[in-house]
Amino acid sequence: MRILLTADPELPVPPSLYGGIERVIDFIARGLRARGHTVGLVAHRDSTCSVDRQFAWPGLRSQSTGDTIVNTAALWRATQQFQPDVLHSFSRLQYLLPLLPGRLPKVMSYQRQPTARTVGWAAKLGGEHLTFTGCSEHIARQGRQAGGNWLGIHNGIELDRYTFQPQVSADAPLVFLSRLEHIKGVHNAIAVAEATGRRLLIAGNRVSSAEGEAYWCTQIAPHLDKNGIEYVGPVDDRQKNELLGQAAAMIVPIEWDEPFGIVFAEALACGTPVISTPRGSLPEIVRPGIDGFLVNSVEEAIAAVQQLDQIDRSHCRERAERHFSDRVIVDQYELLYHKLCAQVISTSTMVSTE
């Protein structure tokens, strides 16, 4: 098959630092090529992903009306030049507008809550030739309410980047790894660490907004360098692997409906149990009592920390291997592409015999 992928224009594929979905697109492209498919990519001009043909977005801002117009035209041209069997968009739905009525099979993937109005009109224009996917069943359920054909396919990780650690020391720390904002729950992670006497290593990017700075100054900074609470800053892939591998658990007690959260799969790949809350996609990722714990309060999180010795870390790794590995995710998309192409062939055959 000839498969044309698109990424949002802001970051290259793969990203140099942060950029979860850009990493997913990168391993999907490489995985498809390894299976003999011809892959094109429309992305940021600095992308280095190994594909058969790359097209650069002329506009680099997803929220800009002007950039949306020029990028829509650019995707049209790329499609005419590459002649894909399937077009798979991880970028803005608006870029697909002139292509929606055509018979080319199209997949639109969502990493966040869909906008009902735009999904509704796209589903009507695209009809049977447009399929939506969500990065979790949680997102797909929301999308179905607006219309269209929806399938939940999780984001994933390159499993080989993460080293399974079957055992950790008795005094292994808890780790918080995410953006340092209120909805990620670092304040609750601190409360749990202080109550249980566990060390807590906090890693992630600070948020530069006024609200983010206020959160840092009032909820995080006063606790640092006391009682084993330490901020280690942003981490790269190597540091992330080491940090998660040494942890008794990763505790990210979210206070919002997480669309997926790649970091949870990364923790499991290292064999590290997850402590979070049962919101958004987390019930799809963590099996309570097997891969970690989903809690509804600080008190429940404290109890979870005290039960970590009941978790077999090999179950965590197995969970990542079976459900969130790059191989599994590429399998699911490849199966979807074959199905969509077969539908087009079947429809064409029916029309020609009438």
Image (cartoon, rainbow, N blue to C red):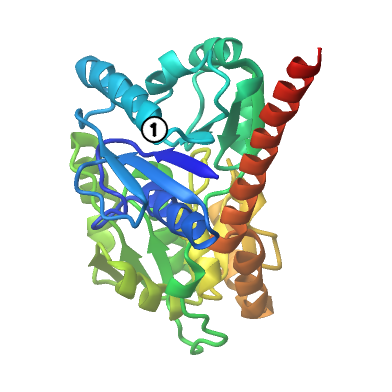
Q: Looking at the rendering, in which quadrant would you find the N terminus?
A: top right
Q: Which residue is mark 1?
A: 91
Picture layout, residue 13 above or below residue 345: below
Picture layout, residue 294 above or below residue 100: below
Q: Residue at x 38, y 26 (%)?
A: 80
Residue 252 in sight = no
Q: Residue at x 70, y 22 (%)?
A: 348
The front one of 196 and 13 is 13
Q: Determine whether the residue tagged by mark 1 lies in a helix, strand or loop.
A: loop
Count the marks: 1
- Please provide percent x and percent y for residue 89: 45, 34
The front one of 285 and 122 is 122
Residue 243 in sight = yes
> 10 Å neighbourhood of mark 1: few (<14), some, or many (≥20)?
many
- Please provide percent x and percent y for residue 237: 33, 68
User: Residue flagged by tag 1: what amino acid is it?
Assistant: Ser
Picture layout, residue 293 above or below residue 163: above
The front one of 26 and 171 is 26
Q: Answer with left or right where residue 316 lies relative to residue 200.
A: right
Q: Quadrant of residue 60?
A: top left
- Please provide percent x and percent y for residue 311: 66, 75
Q: Residue at x 59, y 42 (%)?
A: 136
- Please provide percent x and percent y for residue 315: 67, 74
Q: Looking at the rendering, in which quadrant would you find the C terminus?
A: top right
User: Which residue appears farthest toward the right when viewing the image?
Assistant: 354
